Image: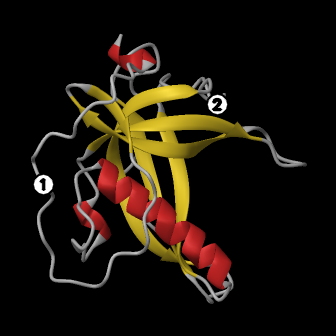
Amino acid sequence: MGNLDNYQVTDEVVSDFTPLPVDKYLASIVEAELKQTKAGTGSYINVKFEVMDGKFKGRWVFIMITFTNPNSTAQEIGRKQLNTLLQAIGYGVGQGIQDTSELTGHAVVIEVGIEQNEGYAPKNTVKNYFSANAQGAVPVAPSAPAPTAAPVQPSAAPVESNDVSPSWAQ
Protein backbone atom coordinates (compact mmCIF):
# COMPACT_ATOMS: atom_id res chain seq x y z
CA MET A 1 0.00 0.00 0.00
CA GLY A 2 1.12 3.56 -0.65
CA ASN A 3 0.74 6.46 1.75
CA LEU A 4 -1.36 9.29 0.25
CA ASP A 5 -0.65 11.55 3.25
CA ASN A 6 -4.34 12.42 3.87
CA TYR A 7 -4.90 13.65 0.29
CA GLN A 8 -7.84 16.07 0.08
CA VAL A 9 -10.19 15.88 -2.93
CA THR A 10 -10.53 19.13 -4.92
CA ASP A 11 -12.76 20.19 -7.78
CA GLU A 12 -9.88 19.92 -10.31
CA VAL A 13 -10.62 17.07 -12.72
CA VAL A 14 -9.42 15.94 -16.11
CA SER A 15 -12.18 16.72 -18.56
CA ASP A 16 -10.92 15.67 -21.97
CA PHE A 17 -9.57 12.28 -22.97
CA THR A 18 -10.52 12.62 -26.64
CA PRO A 19 -7.67 11.99 -29.08
CA LEU A 20 -5.84 14.97 -30.53
CA PRO A 21 -6.71 15.69 -34.17
CA VAL A 22 -4.42 14.19 -36.83
CA ASP A 23 -1.62 16.74 -37.27
CA LYS A 24 1.99 17.53 -36.38
CA TYR A 25 2.68 18.87 -32.89
CA LEU A 26 5.75 20.34 -31.23
CA ALA A 27 6.19 18.20 -28.13
CA SER A 28 8.63 17.48 -25.35
CA ILE A 29 9.54 14.01 -24.15
CA VAL A 30 8.61 14.17 -20.47
CA GLU A 31 8.91 10.48 -19.53
CA ALA A 32 10.57 7.42 -21.03
CA GLU A 33 10.74 4.09 -19.24
CA LEU A 34 11.87 0.62 -20.30
CA LYS A 35 9.27 -1.95 -19.21
CA GLN A 36 8.87 -5.70 -19.52
CA THR A 37 5.95 -7.12 -21.51
CA LYS A 38 3.17 -8.86 -19.57
CA ALA A 39 4.35 -12.20 -20.98
CA GLY A 40 7.90 -11.45 -19.80
CA THR A 41 9.32 -12.34 -23.20
CA GLY A 42 10.22 -8.84 -24.36
CA SER A 43 10.48 -5.20 -23.46
CA TYR A 44 9.24 -1.84 -24.69
CA ILE A 45 9.93 1.83 -24.09
CA ASN A 46 6.89 3.65 -22.75
CA VAL A 47 7.19 7.30 -23.89
CA LYS A 48 5.08 10.26 -22.77
CA PHE A 49 5.07 13.42 -24.91
CA GLU A 50 3.62 16.76 -23.83
CA VAL A 51 2.39 19.17 -26.53
CA MET A 52 4.33 22.41 -26.08
CA ASP A 53 2.26 24.99 -27.93
CA GLY A 54 -0.97 25.81 -29.72
CA LYS A 55 -4.54 24.95 -28.85
CA PHE A 56 -3.55 21.59 -27.36
CA LYS A 57 -0.64 22.83 -25.22
CA GLY A 58 -0.26 20.63 -22.16
CA ARG A 59 -2.00 17.56 -23.64
CA TRP A 60 -0.17 14.24 -23.53
CA VAL A 61 0.44 11.59 -26.15
CA PHE A 62 1.68 8.15 -25.12
CA ILE A 63 3.43 5.50 -27.21
CA MET A 64 5.09 2.16 -26.69
CA ILE A 65 8.17 1.36 -28.77
CA THR A 66 9.07 -2.33 -28.93
CA PHE A 67 12.67 -2.82 -27.81
CA THR A 68 13.08 -6.59 -27.49
CA ASN A 69 10.67 -9.21 -28.78
CA PRO A 70 10.91 -12.89 -29.69
CA ASN A 71 9.29 -11.94 -33.02
CA SER A 72 12.20 -10.51 -35.03
CA THR A 73 9.88 -8.46 -37.28
CA ALA A 74 8.26 -6.75 -34.29
CA GLN A 75 11.68 -6.02 -32.80
CA GLU A 76 12.98 -4.64 -36.13
CA ILE A 77 9.97 -2.30 -36.45
CA GLY A 78 10.48 -1.08 -32.88
CA ARG A 79 14.18 -0.47 -33.41
CA LYS A 80 13.43 1.53 -36.58
CA GLN A 81 10.92 3.63 -34.62
CA LEU A 82 13.51 4.23 -31.89
CA ASN A 83 16.18 5.13 -34.49
CA THR A 84 13.81 7.63 -36.10
CA LEU A 85 13.05 9.24 -32.73
CA LEU A 86 16.74 9.38 -31.77
CA GLN A 87 17.71 10.97 -35.09
CA ALA A 88 14.90 13.53 -34.74
CA ILE A 89 16.27 14.63 -31.34
CA GLY A 90 19.81 14.95 -32.67
CA TYR A 91 21.55 11.58 -32.39
CA GLY A 92 23.63 10.59 -35.40
CA VAL A 93 24.03 7.12 -36.89
CA GLY A 94 26.49 5.18 -34.74
CA GLN A 95 25.93 7.24 -31.59
CA GLY A 96 24.77 5.28 -28.54
CA ILE A 97 22.22 5.73 -25.80
CA GLN A 98 22.58 3.95 -22.47
CA ASP A 99 19.39 4.81 -20.59
CA THR A 100 15.84 5.92 -21.37
CA SER A 101 16.41 8.98 -19.15
CA GLU A 102 18.57 10.35 -22.00
CA LEU A 103 15.38 10.78 -24.05
CA THR A 104 13.61 13.09 -21.60
CA GLY A 105 13.70 16.84 -22.05
CA HIS A 106 14.13 16.76 -25.81
CA ALA A 107 11.78 18.68 -28.10
CA VAL A 108 10.54 16.87 -31.19
CA VAL A 109 7.75 17.30 -33.70
CA ILE A 110 5.41 14.30 -33.58
CA GLU A 111 3.07 13.36 -36.40
CA VAL A 112 -0.03 12.18 -34.58
CA GLY A 113 -2.61 9.79 -35.97
CA ILE A 114 -5.66 8.10 -34.47
CA GLU A 115 -5.80 4.36 -33.92
CA GLN A 116 -9.11 2.52 -33.56
CA ASN A 117 -9.15 -1.04 -32.27
CA GLU A 118 -12.34 -3.03 -31.96
CA GLY A 119 -13.75 -2.88 -28.46
CA TYR A 120 -11.65 0.12 -27.43
CA ALA A 121 -12.02 3.89 -27.61
CA PRO A 122 -9.99 5.69 -30.30
CA LYS A 123 -6.50 6.71 -29.17
CA ASN A 124 -3.60 8.70 -30.51
CA THR A 125 -0.58 7.08 -32.06
CA VAL A 126 2.67 8.64 -33.27
CA LYS A 127 3.22 7.95 -36.96
CA ASN A 128 6.54 9.77 -37.38
CA TYR A 129 9.07 12.08 -35.73
CA PHE A 130 10.67 15.23 -37.07
CA SER A 131 13.49 17.47 -35.90
CA ALA A 132 12.23 20.48 -33.94
CA ASN A 133 14.81 22.94 -35.24
CA ALA A 134 14.15 26.62 -35.85
CA GLN A 135 13.92 26.18 -39.62
CA GLY A 136 10.90 23.85 -39.54
CA ALA A 137 10.26 20.14 -39.35
CA VAL A 138 12.65 17.92 -41.25
CA PRO A 139 11.54 14.32 -41.89
CA VAL A 140 13.99 11.76 -40.59
CA ALA A 141 14.06 8.49 -42.51
CA PRO A 142 14.34 5.33 -40.40
CA SER A 143 17.75 3.70 -40.53
CA ALA A 144 19.22 0.36 -39.62
CA PRO A 145 19.82 -0.22 -35.91
CA ALA A 146 22.92 1.59 -34.73
CA PRO A 147 25.75 -0.55 -33.41
CA THR A 148 26.33 -0.54 -29.67
CA ALA A 149 28.85 2.17 -28.90
CA ALA A 150 30.00 4.32 -26.03
CA PRO A 151 27.45 7.03 -25.21
CA VAL A 152 27.92 10.21 -27.20
CA GLN A 153 26.02 13.42 -26.66
CA PRO A 154 23.61 14.43 -29.47
CA SER A 155 24.91 16.85 -32.05
CA ALA A 156 23.87 20.46 -31.60
CA ALA A 157 24.36 21.18 -35.29
CA PRO A 158 21.23 22.45 -37.06
CA VAL A 159 19.54 20.15 -39.52
CA GLU A 160 18.95 21.53 -43.01
CA SER A 161 15.34 22.34 -43.79
CA ASN A 162 13.38 21.06 -46.75
CA ASP A 163 11.19 24.18 -46.51
CA VAL A 164 8.19 22.19 -45.26
CA SER A 165 6.36 24.40 -42.80
CA PRO A 166 4.26 22.33 -40.38
CA SER A 167 1.08 23.71 -38.87
CA TRP A 168 2.78 24.34 -35.51
CA ALA A 169 5.38 26.59 -37.16
CA GLN A 170 2.87 28.84 -38.93
Q: Position of residue 68 (x, y in %)?
A: 53, 82
Please tell me the numbered disc located at residue 155: 1
Characterize the local packing of mark 1: few (<14), some (14-19) or many (20 or more) Cα atoms within 10 angstroms. Answer: few
Vertical placement of residue 142 versus 25, above or below: below
The local crowd at label 2, few if under 14, some if 14 to 19, many if 20 or more residues have their Cα within 10 Å, is some
Q: Is residue 156 left or right of residue 133?
A: left
Which image quadrant: the C terminus?
A: top left
In the image shown, does 162 or 112 lie closer to the viewer? 162
CA separation in Å, label 2 and label 1: 33 Å
Name the side, left or right, on which 89 lies relative to 68.
left
- Determine the residue located farthest toward the right in the rendered image: 118
2 or 1: tag closer to the N-terminus: 2
Which type of secondary structure does the marked residue at label 2 adopt?
Answer: loop
Circle on res. 19:
2
Amino acid type, label 1: Ser
In the depicted structure, whether residue 48 falls above or below residue 17: below
